[in-house]
Amino acid sequence: MNKSKLLKTIIAIVALVILIVGGYVYKDAIQSRIARMAAVVSGQEIKPILNSEGRYIRQIVAQDNSTSRTIMWQSDSSEADAVIEYRLAGSENTQTIGATDKVFTDDGSTTYIHEATLTGLTPNTKYEYRVGYGADRRSDWYSLETAGASVYDVLIYPDSQSGDYSQWEEIVKDSAHRNPRTALYISMGDLVDNGEQDYQWRTWLNSIRPLSANVPLATTLGNHEMYTLDWKMREPYAYLNYFAVPPNGNETFNRRYYSYDFGDVHYVVLDTQLYESNHEDNHDTHHPDLYDVQVQWLRQDLAANTKKWTVVLMHRDPFQYAIDRPGASRDVGFNEEGVLFMPIFDEFNVDLVLSAHLHSYRNRGHVRNFDRDASGPLYILTGIAGDTRRPKWKEHPLDVYVAPDRDKNNYMAMTVTPNKLIVKAFLPDGTQLDESVIEK
C-alpha cells in the first residue's frame, strides 16, 4: 500500500473511532493525533504537536507590551527542548527562543509549564508565533500584536469562580466575538472557587481558548486563589505558576502585585489579600507586612509612571457596605483597603479604579477624599461572571448606578483613545448596562 492510500486508511479509521467514542472531552486529543499520524505517514518535516503537548497556549502581559510579551503553555510530560518561534506576520523569517520546562504538582496532578518572554519587538506591529519542541514538532501559528499609540479595546471580566464554568466560558467566547478589536483582557480575581483544586484550573484555562492564544491576559489575585481543598489558607501556588505576570522586585510577594504598560495606559494590579496572608496559625502564609511593603512599592511605581492614563485593578473593593443582621453590624463607609489606598490614588491622580469581590456591578462615579468630586478617580465595582452569588448588598451613598438584576452575570469593555477612556458594562447577551467616559 502506498503512502497516500495508507494515510487515507488511517484517517478513516480514526474518524470512525471519533464517531464511536463521541465525547467532547476527547475530540481535541483525537484530532491532534490524526494530524500527527497524517504528518508522519506523508513524511512532513514539521509535525503538529499533540493536544497533550500543547495545553492552554496563552499570552500573558509583559512589563512593556509595546516591545515584549510572555508566552506560556503546558504539557503532560517533560519536554526539555521547548521552544517558541516568532516572526513578522506574513514573513518567512523566523526567530527561535528556548522556553522553560518546569514541573508543577498540585492536588495530586502534575503538569509541565513552558514559558518565555519575547523581547525587542517593534511597537504597534503584528507578529505570529508558535510553540513546540526540538526541530520538528510545532503548534499552529497564532497572532501577537504589540501595543502602540493607536486606539484599542480591553475586555474586563469580574469574578469567574464557579461550579462548572459553563456560564463563564459562554461570556468569554461571546464577548470576544463581539469585540474583535480586543488587544488585552483582564481578570479581576477569584478566577476559580478553590485555588488548590486542579479540575477548576484546567477547566478555567480551557474555557478561555482561543482568546488566550491571540490576546494577552492580565490577572488579578483574588482571595479564592489562596484556599486549600479544605478551605484553609495557603500561598497562591497555582495562580503564581499558571500566570507569569511581570515581577515586582520583591522575592516574598513576587507577581502577587505588579504593573505593566499597554499603549498610553499604566496599569497597576494590587494584592488585597492581607486577611488571607495574616493568619498566625499558618507560618507559611503569615505575611502581616503585605500592605506596608506594597504601599512603598505603589508610591515608587506611580511616581515613575510616564503614561497619560493610570488604571488600578484590585480584587477587594475599597468601599464598605452596611450590614445589619443578628450577630453582625457594620456601617456604610470604606474598608481597610479603601482607607489605605484611596488617598494614594488621589495623590497620584489615578484615572480609574476597578474592583471586584462583592459580585455586584456598581458605578460610584468620581471620588476624591472619600467624597463626591469630579477631579477624583472613577470607581467601578465590576460585577460577576460566574455562577457564585453573594448577598444583595445595601446601596452605598456614593453609588451612581447599580445593576438592576444583581443575579445576572456581566462583563465590561474599555476603549482607550488619545483623549478618552470609554468604560461600558454589558449583560452576557451584549445588552449595555452602563457607560462612563473619562476625558483628559
Image (spheres, grey):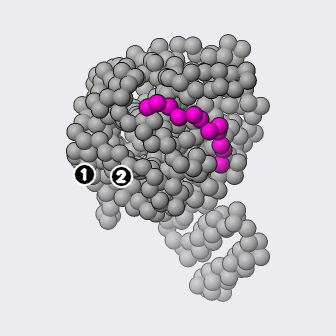
Q: Is residue 415 visible?
A: yes
Question: Could you tell me which residue is drawn at 63 percent across and 65 percent down?
Answer: 28
Is 234 positioned to the left or the right of 158 in the image? right
Whole-number angstrom distance, CA of label 2 to CA of label 1: 10 Å
Reply yes or no: does residue 65 show up in magenta. no
Who is closer to the viewer here, 175 or 343? 343
* Residue 118 percent coordinates (x, y): 38, 45
Q: Which residues are magenta?
A: 386-398
Reply yes or no: does residue 397 show up in magenta. yes
Question: Could you tell me which residue is drawn at 60 percent across and 82 percent down?
Answer: 3
Q: Which dot marks residue 153?
A: 2
Quarter-of-image position of residue 240: top right
Question: Could you tell me which residue is drawn at 63 percent across and 83 percent down?
Answer: 8
Quarter-of-image position of residue 38: bottom right
* Residue 44 percent coordinates (x, y): 51, 71
The prevailing secondary structure element of the residues shown in magenta is loop
* Residue 312 percent coordinates (x, y): 40, 33
Is 216 positioned to the left or the right of 332 in the image? left
For the residue marked with disc 1, what is the amino acid?
Ser
Q: Is residue 259 visible?
A: no
Q: Which dot marks residue 150?
A: 1
For the residue marked with disc 2, what is the amino acid?
Asp
Is 163 positioned to the left or the right of 114 in the image? right
Q: Which dot marks residue 433?
A: none
Q: Secondary structure at mark 2?
A: strand
- Alpha-carbon neighbours of circle 2 within 10 Å: few (<14), some, or many (≥20)? many
Of marks 2 and 1, the one in the foreground: 2
Do the CB atoms of the residues marked 2 and 1 lie less than 8 Å apart?
no
